[in-house]
Amino acid sequence: MSDFVLGVDLDGVCGDYTAAFKAVVSADRGIDPATLTDDVSWDFAEWGLDREGFLAMHRSGVEHHHMFRHMPPMPGVADALWRLSDAGVWIRIITHRLVTNWGHALIVSDTVEWLDTNRIPYRDLCFLGRKPEVQATAYIEDAPHNVEALRAGGNDVVVFDQPYNRHLDGLRAANWEQAESVISDLVAEAVGSYDAQMPGMDAGADRLDRRIVHGD
């Protein structure tokens, strides 16, 4: 079933960018993180940031706080992606983290470390902004402009629910349990079947840890 390629975004989909960025902003400003709302728009204007201020704070998060290494994972993301991968879905991580011309080596290394630490399965890792050029069968994405561009190109896109994308219609998932269900339906429609667990596969995102412990 590797003909079905799932393009998976990272920030706001696999990792809780809002939580990680809130920790950065509150630390740099010396304020209580509880004063920063979770009901945010794309550039976090609700936190008193304009585009320039957002980029400066984002840079501080990446360079000084290693935000991409320590970002909390979304609940259930690793197990859901492992089940999809075990069913034959090709997981292609696609992220636009190289936003400006600085710190690329740090961003890439922290991203890979985060993926490994959180046991996220993937076969490809792509750093690019123009996601319609990635040639996946379907996508899961939170950024409104990416969703609209991908759909304009005729792609199936599952919107991972965030406050800034609730004006979008179509396929949507509020969490990874819902996302897995929606994606499995897309797989079944595309290839004619969906086998949730291929024979001989250990279940669970912690399978590698179990094998190390038991010496397999």
Image (tube, grey):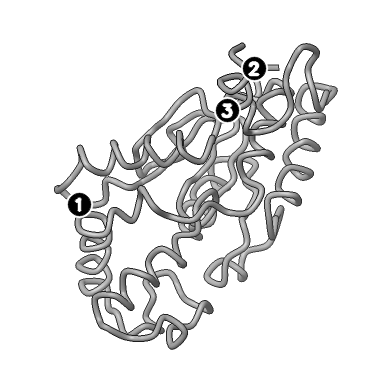
Query: Residue 68 at what x, y percent from top left?
Result: 35, 50
SS state under label 2? loop
Asked if residue 6 is positioned above or below residue 46 in the image, the reply reads above
Amino acid carrying label 3: it is: Asp
Q: Nearer the viewer, residue 181 or 24?
A: 24
**Numbered mark located on residue 209 in the image:** 3
Which of 56 and 52 lies nearest the eye of the viewer? 56
Q: Which is more toward the observer, 80 or 90?
A: 80
Q: Residue 81's x, y, as percent?
A: 64, 36
Q: Who's the residue at 52% across and 28% down the image?
A: 122
Q: Residues within 10 Å of mark 2 (few under 14, many from 20)?
A: few
The amino acid type found where label 2 is placed reads Ser
Mark-to-mark CA distance, 2 and 1: 33 Å
Amino acid at the residue labelled 1: Thr
Q: Separation of disc 3 and disc 1 at Cα?
A: 36 Å
Query: Closer to the camera: disc 3 or disc 1?
Result: 3
Q: Quadrant of the C terminus?
A: top right
